[in-house]
Image (cartoon, helix red, strand yellow):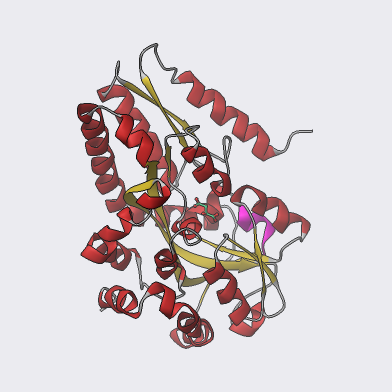
């Protein structure tokens, strides 16, 4: 018996395989976990593929594997270091086990919106973060945006106490585990591809994610509703291995990195629109979205923000202060 996800996955593989590479072309495999429609990462990956295959035709050929068809994000870094894939764009949460500085991004209510995230990443502190994992064989090539996270569960979440005792899926991140513990909830780290099934069967009661992920994975179908908390950020690091980058001849590398930079700038500028379209698509499909009053939202801030102090030493008080400047 095949699940709907597996059928979709097969379709996606067939589609990427159709962009077949010619002999002599360097193959760039890009593995990611989201859908491609109404999704910031899916759209950016498709544009990158199209541009590389048009402009580097004969030299390079990109194959994109979306929807976790090749690897989960928990597996993809290892696969990259083995040389099985050349490009990935996992959520920043996946890197906190490699570089504690990345925990900054998972701290709840650290950034007020994606513009603040963008400005911080463009600063010297943010740009230095691209180079922080070179010793581990990884080179950050840029940040791709998704959006702010919202909570959903199998019951209405209006005040923080509503989350008490519920099981929430989180990405594999100690900060996100601490955040759910602060709510009196039970955090369950789990791969993205397993979340829909876990929500549907009641293995977990709720989850946190962006509008495009909640729409793309249809989480709203198996949840009571979504509460618009905007409590954290979900953003991506486009990453390659140092070994692979070093293996490219200078012209090829420059051309590829220039295309990637242009795609990054273009798609990041449009991300707010994609986010709102996904929010609207959830409503159009009958998903329940609950807005909070300022006072109600402040209650969530009061319960979750104390998590910062647990991670301040690892993340660096100066980095927290630098990030906060962009919320002004
Ligand atoms: C998640 O696991 O929820 C996200 O990291 C998925 C993604 O890539 O947006």
Q: In this view, does 65 lie above or below 156?
A: above
- Relative side of 224 to 305, left or right: right
- Asked if residue 143 can be seen in this view, the reply is yes
Query: Where 159 sits versus 279, above or below?
Result: below
Query: Residue 44 appears at what percent x and percent y?
Result: 37, 42
At 44% from the left edge and 17% from the top edge, which residue is drawn?
Answer: 20
* Residue 148 % position (x, y): 43, 64
User: Is the residue 254 above or below the residue 278 in the image?
Assistant: above
For the residue pair 137 and 161, the one nearer the viewer reads as 137
Q: Which residue is drawn at 47% across and 40% down?
A: 81
Q: Quadrant of residue 233?
A: bottom left
Q: Measured from the top left, where is residue 146 in percent x and y?
A: 41, 55
Furthest residue toward top:
23
Instruction: Return the residue nearer the eye: 194 or 40.
Output: 194
Horizontal side of 10 relative to 312 (left or right) equals: right
Question: What segment carries the magenta color?
Answer: 218-223
Q: Nearer the viewer, residue 118 or 85?
A: 85
Q: Does the magenta stretch include residue 273?
A: no
The majority secondary structure of the magenta stretch comes to helix
In the displayed structure, does residue 253 sit left or right of residue 3? left
Q: Which residue is drawn at 38% across and 41% down?
A: 240
275 vs 54, nearest the viewer: 54
The magenta stretch spans residue 222: yes
Location of the N terminus (image quadrant): top right
x, y percent for residue 227: 55, 71
Whether residue 34 is visible here, answered yes or no, is no
- Residue projecting furthest to the front: 135
Residue at 62% of width from left, 47% of height from top?
A: 193
Question: Which image quadrant is residue 266 in?
Answer: top left
């Amino acid at each position: 018996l095949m699940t709907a996800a597996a059928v979709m996955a097969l379709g996606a593989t067939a589609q990427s395989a159709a962009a077949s590479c010619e002999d002599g072309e360097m193959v760039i495999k890009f593995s990611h976990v989201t859908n491609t429609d109404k999704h910031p990462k899916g759209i950016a990956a498709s544009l990158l593929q199209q541009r590389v295959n048009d402009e580097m035709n004969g030299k390079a050929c990109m194959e994109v594997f979306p929807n976790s068809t090749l690897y989960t994000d928990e597996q993809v870094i290892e696969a990259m270091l083995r040389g099985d894939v050349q490009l990935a764009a996992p959520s920043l949460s996946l890197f906190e086990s490699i570089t504690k500085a990345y925990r900054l991004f998972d701290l709840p209510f650290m950034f007020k919106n994606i513009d603040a995230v963008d400005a911080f990443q463009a600063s010297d502190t943010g740009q230095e973060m691209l180079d922080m994992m070179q010793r581990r064989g990884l080179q950050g090539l840029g940040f791709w945006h998704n959006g702010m996270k919202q909570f959903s569960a199998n019951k209405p979440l209006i005040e923080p106490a509503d989350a008490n005792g519920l099981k929430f899926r989180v990405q594999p991140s100690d900060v996100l585990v601490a955040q759910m513990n602060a709510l009196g909830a039970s955090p369950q780290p789990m791969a993205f591809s397993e979340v829909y099934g876990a929500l549907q069967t009641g293995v977990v009661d709720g989850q946190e994610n962006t509008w495009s992920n909640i729409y793309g994975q249809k989480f709203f179908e198996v949840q009571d509703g979504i509460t618009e908390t905007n409590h954290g950020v979900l953003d991506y690091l486009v990453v390659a291995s140092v070994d692979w980058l070093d293996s490219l001849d200078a012209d090829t590398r420059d051309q590829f990195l220039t295309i990637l930079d242009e795609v990054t700038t273009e798609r990041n500028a449009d991300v707010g629109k994609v986010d709102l379209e996904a929010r609207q698509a959830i409503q159009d499909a009958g998903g329940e979205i609950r807005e909070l009053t300022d006072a109600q939202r402040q209650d969530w801030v009061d319960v979750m923000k104390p998590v910062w102090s647990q991670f301040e030493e690892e993340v660096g008080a100066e980095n927290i202060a630098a990030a906060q400047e962009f919320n002004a």
